[in-house]
Image (tube, rainbow, N blue to C red):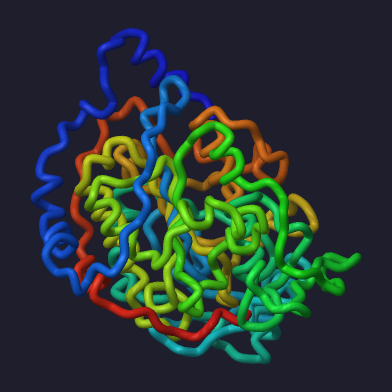
Amino acid sequence: MTFPRSAAIHRANPSFSWRRAVPFTGGAIALSGLVWLVGCQASLVTFSSPPVPASTVTPVTGSPIEHVVIIMQENRSFDNLFNGFPGADTVQTGMRDGMAVPLQPVSLGDKRELGHSHTDWWQAWNGGNMDGFSSAAGGSMLPYSYVPRSDVEPYWQLALQYTIGDRMFQANTGPSFVSHQYMIAGQSAGVADNPSGNIWGCDAPAGTVAATIGSDPGTLGAGVYPCFDYTTMADLLDAKGVTWRYYAPGPDNHFFVLSAYQAIRHIRFGTDWTEKVISPQKRVLTDIANGQLAQVTWIVPDFSHSDHPGGAQEGPAWVASIVNAIGESKFWNSTAIFISWDDWGGWYDHVTPPAIDNMGPGFRVPLIVVSPWAKRGYVSHQFHEESGFLTFIEQNFGLPSLGTRDAGKGTFDDCFDYLQFPQTFRHVQSQISAQDILRENFSGPPDDD
């Protein structure tokens, strides 16, 4: 990523301050309800995060982005979640075994789940014909569905105001565990499917295996124990002194399986685990209210606040609560928020993914880029995949490449305009508030495929 235009502005006017471009006003008032909950209702606050240390690391010259936030949601294809979005490439008719079939509306809260394993992906892809989704679902027509806009209105609010990408692809041809490894490392050591059992990563019992990709990419190999020691983005950040936090459900929650760093041995059993991997994930709301936001932040929901079928249909409100917390804080003018979905969840999508290597990428998933520097009302048709988050972080903070899928694949340059006057934040309306989320308990079954 390069910043030639913004760098030119800074040279022409050295006193120009990105953070002063839009005065921060009203943030304390807007967040006052959340701060009041933190300060005055002790029954709601049973946790506190380690403070984010001060950092002297600044973005590369010309970048106004001092904080990168990645919110990873669950199990939706682009055609399924943003069907009919203005200017985006979606269809109302899908292909089933070479025959056209209409896509039908199905609620976000529908509890029926579709298979989305590595082999399911290959069956749905069907040699690039993109017509085997029903076969992968045992003959069901459920994959040929879309979520009505009314169910996900907060997402549409964000996408219409900022940037949405309709050429964002999940990193891998399979389910969540692998995708989350690509989100932090741009690789998965060849693992192509979720581990066996209900406990994943380095906490998994002996005998747990995660299938590796077979000699034929459409098949699976014998598998390995799902605990790795490859280099991750956290290691690059630690080496440079860039602060980071990873917010995810803890061991008492079924969605602990999605806590990606628990599968990295030197993180799981090192000091980073206790200081930088934060559970429960709702701590991000109180941390932001208390003026704490790391330079790089990942956020993973629990089941109730995910878009996984069978959830409480609160995923859009959960994402909105995080965006509102940042937007109404002192961090807004210096933050880029990336919102995406870890895999397609078995739902139909009509765009054939390009081939990079034998691991993927997989089918399209939605992408929303929220920032005062994001292009306004822009639909990106350029190729992106989740390893590009790593590339963006590396280029923004002057880090070396991991040398995995992050190396030059799908940067997000087209989604930003550092010459534009930064947008003033507008509160995202949703039916559930941050205060409601802080009161809620966590629940839900594991994501077993």
Judge whether residue 88 can be spotted in this image.
no
Q: Is 327 placed above or below 23 here?
A: below
Q: Which is more toward the observer, 190 or 287?
A: 287
Asked if residue 364 lies left or right of residue 92, the reply is right
- The residue positioned 35% from the left and 56% from the top of the image is 49
- The residue positioned 44% from the left and 77% from the top of the image is 303
Q: Is 192 placed above or below 360 here?
A: below
**Quadrant position of the N terminus in the picture:** top right
Quadrant location of residue 262? bottom right
Q: Which is more toward the observer, 341 or 439?
A: 439
Quadrant location of residue 106? bottom left
Q: Is 66 placed above or below 16 here?
A: below
Asked if residue 368 lies left or right of residue 89, the reply is left
**Quadrant position of the C terminus in the picture:** bottom right
Q: Which is more toward the observer, 85 or 124?
A: 124
- The residue positioned 12% from the left and 61% from the top of the image is 36
Judge whether residue 296 can be spotted in this image.
yes
Asked if residue 178 lies left or right of residue 150, the reply is right
- The residue positioned 52% from the left and 47% from the top of the image is 381
Q: How many marks?
A: 0
Q: Position of residue 391 (x, y in %)?
A: 58, 39
Q: Position of residue 331 (x, y in %)?
A: 28, 41
Quick one: which residue is furthest to the right in this view? 215
Q: Position of residue 70 (x, y in %)?
A: 45, 52
